[in-house]
Image (spheres, helix red, strand yellow):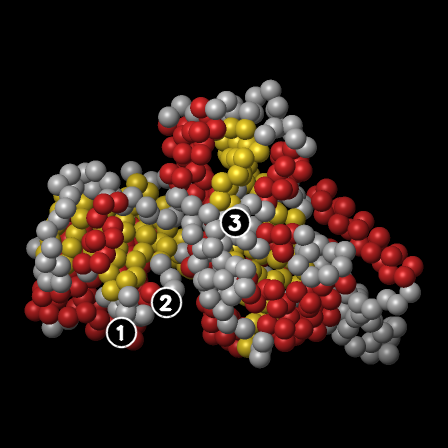
Amino acid sequence: MTHEILISGFGGQGVLFAGKLLAYAAMLEEKYVSWLPSYGPEMRGGTANCSVIISDEPVSCPLVTNPTVLVAMNAPSLDKFEDSVTKDGKIFTDASLISQEFKRNDTSNFAIPSTKMAEELQASKLSNMVLLGKVVKETSVLPFESIINALKKTVPASKQAMLEINKKALETGFNA
Amino acid sequence: MSEKVLMKGNEALAEAAIQAGCKHFFGYPITPQTEVAAYMAKQMPKRDGTFLQAESEVAAINMVYGAAGAGARVMTSSSSPGISLKQEGISYIAGADLPCVIVNIVRGGPGLGGIQPAQSDYFQATKGGGHGDYHLVVFAPSSVQELVNLTKEAFDVADIYRMPVMIMGDGMLGQMMEPVEFGAYTPREIPEKTWATTGTEMKRKHNVVNSLYITASDLEELILERQKRYDVIEEKEARFEAYKTEDAEIIVTAYGITARIAQTAVNKAREQGIKVGMIRPITLWPFPKKAFAELDTNKVKNVLCVEMSMGQMVEDVRLSLDCKIPVDFFGRTGGVVPTPDEVLTKIKALYEGR
């Protein structure tokens, strides 16, 4: 089984971190994994994205061109990548920021108001974690516990307070 | 130390260098390899080493020249335009027979070019980017793990043959993260550095670091001596990986990250019943000529070379094959990365045209 995941949004929304957390969790689960960011001037307020591949076999090409899972955190990302999602793939969007309808009807589409949900947790920047929670719920990528394990290992000791709120955001998305 | 960690290529290569005993790093920042210097800046002072951000690439390579002359393990890192600036120093270091490691995380060129991944510095790396009769050993890793292993080995190879070794990656390999283990490498046997300028303590004749030989016959003699070493390297150090080549009628060849892209295309073509395999050069100099020269011409009908350039390694592939098998080329350049589907289309076209 190979999951090709593309997470895309504005620079600053935490798309790279969401991907990193997923990759780290997959590594802890002994999966083959790669994480590839877009890099360059577009990161300054423009769009940023990362390719994450999680597989039972060694990863050959680390670049995701046809994602099985797309997480679009803003409208330009949905515009850019919606067509590239594989048939029967899954698309996740932040409905707080994206008002447009999905063009695709051969994919499973999940629009949740993740920014609004994060704000309700007093953590407006954790829309990425809310969406990631939803991704884990609706796909067979990884068990929820492994994401929490990865979170525990990646959050530095000096920022333990961040752990709880990130966990809560993941749970909110998972239960949405 | 065999626990897996998730690391960016640039950071993993810096860590590997420190573990290999690199005590001095001199560099100047440039995208997409700046994380190498950032990691060194953080770690070197804690680990008994020196990190110095030079005022320019030219200064950095000359600092490498100095530290190498003293027999220290030393590295510099840059990306394409920066490597061009270093060429004078690299030629001097080769001319003085000194070991060092030079990292080029290649980006699109020529000129300032762009910052996205490319492989268009192949000619510069393998055919002598600076002046004079010299070579660098050039390693082309295709995963973060291989980047770690080859970085460690690069220091050994440099010391064994007393010459600069280049690690040639690209923006994609430098920026991506993969799980890596650091425990896997067994060091090679390193000769004592009797030539190093470490002070005589009045006990021996002093050593000289020099690349100037005014008498033509002296210079020729030295170059011929060095050539003998190059011949040994061509014999012993050429390396490649063969993938599904046993029954292949089409051979795809690619190096570095492009080989990963090509491998996906090879797998997809195999699913469609096309007998295709891959040869991945791991050393670009010495070029693994035998891997191509020994292909069965009755079986292999086509060779397809895929690069992130307008076609540079393809010349070495053609020379190795000596016109025995037709060689086609597919490349994207300027920072555009080829997709597996583009490579697959090319493979299918060749297969149908057999």
Q: Which mark is residue B22?
A: none
Query: Chain ID for label 1?
Result: A
Residue bearing mark 2? A41
- Is residue A87 toward the left or the right of residue A30 in the image? left
Query: x, y percentage for residue B283?
Result: 61, 47
- Is residue B50 toward the left or the right of residue A24 in the image? right
Q: Is residue B119 above or below residue B21?
A: above
Q: Which mark is residue B309?
A: 3
Residue bearing mark 1? A159
Question: How many angstroms separate mark 2 from mark 3 (CA)?
Answer: 22 Å
Question: How many angstroms separate mark 1 from mark 2 (CA)?
Answer: 29 Å
Kind of residue sitting beneath label 3? Ser
Q: Quadrant of residue B269?
A: top left
Residue at horizontal 77 percent and vertical 65 percent from the top: B96
Q: Nearer the viewer, residue B21 or A43?
A: A43
Q: Nearer the viewer, residue A76 or B28?
A: A76
Query: Chain ID for label 3?
Result: B
Residue at horizontal 58 percent and vertical 76 percent from the top: B56
Query: x, y percentage for residue B50?
Result: 58, 76
- Is residue A132 toward the left or the right of residue B218 in the image? left
Residue at horizontal 56 percent and vertical 25 percent from the top: B300
- Count the marks: how many? 3
